[in-house]
């Protein structure tokens, strides 16, 4: 009976010897966790797809000697390359030290598949989607559907990350154009000729001179050469 008990003890001891001991989280890892959580929140708000983060924590010259978890407060996360966090050790009083986190962000975004000329209307053939570094790109286009039909404000090279600030809605009505003023009232459509006094893209409000009455009215651009009263409900509303 004694020999059997000893054998059991010998079998159990090696199992206990290999049980891993979880190390307490370091201050740097806690700061990195806070920074990653902030970046994930920003990525969700921007509708980023497959967002990935590479983080580098830059500690102060004198790191806190804290036996347990620290308190991490967010100071400034507007620039991914220089995010600022304040760290305080509850056991060591109320003094705080500042940590810097430098982040590299990549995500699945819209990229030009071919060169695009300035003022060129974008089509599906111009666009593709790929994983790119967008650390310094504040307004990447996420979905090609948001860019198709838009006009490039400047020339773009193949492989460029497409930005919302680099595209605009095409001008459908130019100043001096002859336009058709269309009003729909209780299912009845009434149209008359007019002259555009402003240029505008779809949805823009422009001044139009009625060719019959000479009266100038404000109209909303609905298509190439067509406008409607600004107070007219849009389809689907």
Image (cartoon, rainbow, N blue to C red):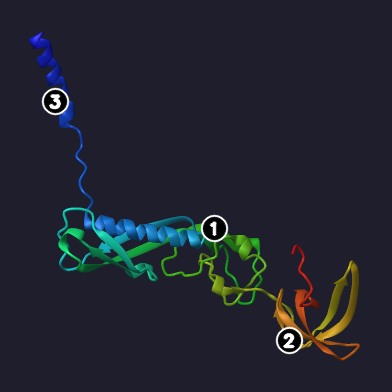
116 horizontally vs 200: left or right: left
Q: Residues within 10 Å of mark 2 (few under 14, many from 20)?
A: some
Res 53 visible: yes
Q: In this view, which residue lies farthest toward the bottom? A: 214
Q: Residues within 10 Å of mark 1 (few under 14, many from 20)?
A: some
CA separation in Å, label 1 and label 3: 56 Å
Residue 83: x %, y % from top left: 33, 68
Closer to the camera in the image, 209 or 231: 231
237 horizontally vs 68: left or right: right
Residue 225: x %, y % from top left: 80, 77
Residue at image location 31% in from the left, 64% down from the top: 73
Residue at image location 12% in from the left, 14% down from the top: 5
CA separation in Å, label 2 and label 1: 36 Å
Q: Earlier in the sequence, mark 2 or mark 3?
A: 3
Residue 220 falls in which quadrant of the image? bottom right
Instruction: Give the residue at mark 1.
Output: 129
229 horizontally vs 68: left or right: right
Is residue 217 positioned above or below 14 on the image? below
Q: Earlier in the sequence, mark 2 or mark 1?
A: 1
Residue at image location 53% in from the left, 63% down from the top: 111
Residue 171: x %, y % from top left: 70, 78
Residue 116: x %, y % from top left: 59, 71
Q: Residues within 10 Å of mark 3 (few under 14, many from 20)?
A: few
Instruction: Give the residue at mark 2.
Output: 198
> What secondary structure is found at the residue carrying circle 1?
strand
Q: In this view, which residue lies farthest toward the top? A: 1
Residue 13 image label: 3
Circles 2, 3 touching at the beta carbon (< 8 Å): no
Comparing labels 1 and 3, the label whose residue is closer to the camera: 3
Which quadrant of the rendered structure holds the N terminus?
Answer: top left
């Amino acid at each position: 009976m004694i020999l059997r008990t000893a054998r059991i003890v010998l079998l159990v001891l090696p199992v206990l010897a290999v049980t891993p001991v979880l190390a307490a989280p370091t201050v740097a890892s806690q700061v990195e966790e806070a920074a990653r959580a902030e970046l994930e929140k920003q990525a969700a708000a921007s509708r980023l797809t497959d967002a990935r983060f590479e983080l580098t924590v830059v500690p102060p010259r004198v790191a806190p000697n804290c036996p347990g978890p620290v308190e991490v407060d967010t100071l400034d996360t507007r620039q991914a390359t220089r995010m600022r966090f304040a760290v305080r050790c509850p056991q060591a009083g109320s003094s705080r030290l500042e940590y810097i986190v430098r982040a590299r962000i990549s995500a699945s975004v819209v990229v030009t598949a071919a060169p695009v000329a300035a003022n060129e209307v974008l089509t599906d053939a111009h666009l593709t989607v790929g994983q790119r570094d967008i650390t310094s790109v504040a307004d990447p286009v996420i979905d090609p559907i948001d860019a198709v039909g838009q006009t490039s404000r400047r020339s773009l090279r193949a492989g460029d990350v497409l930005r919302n600030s680099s595209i605009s809605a095409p001008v459908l009505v130019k100043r001096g154009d002859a336009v058709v003023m269309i009003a729909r009232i209780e299912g009845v459509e009434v149209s008359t000729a007019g002259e555009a006094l402003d240029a505008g893209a779809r949805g823009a409000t422009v001044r139009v001179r009625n060719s019959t009455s000479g009266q100038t009215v404000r109209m909303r651009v609905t298509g190439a050469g067509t406008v409607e009263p600004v107070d007219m409900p849009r389809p689907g509303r």
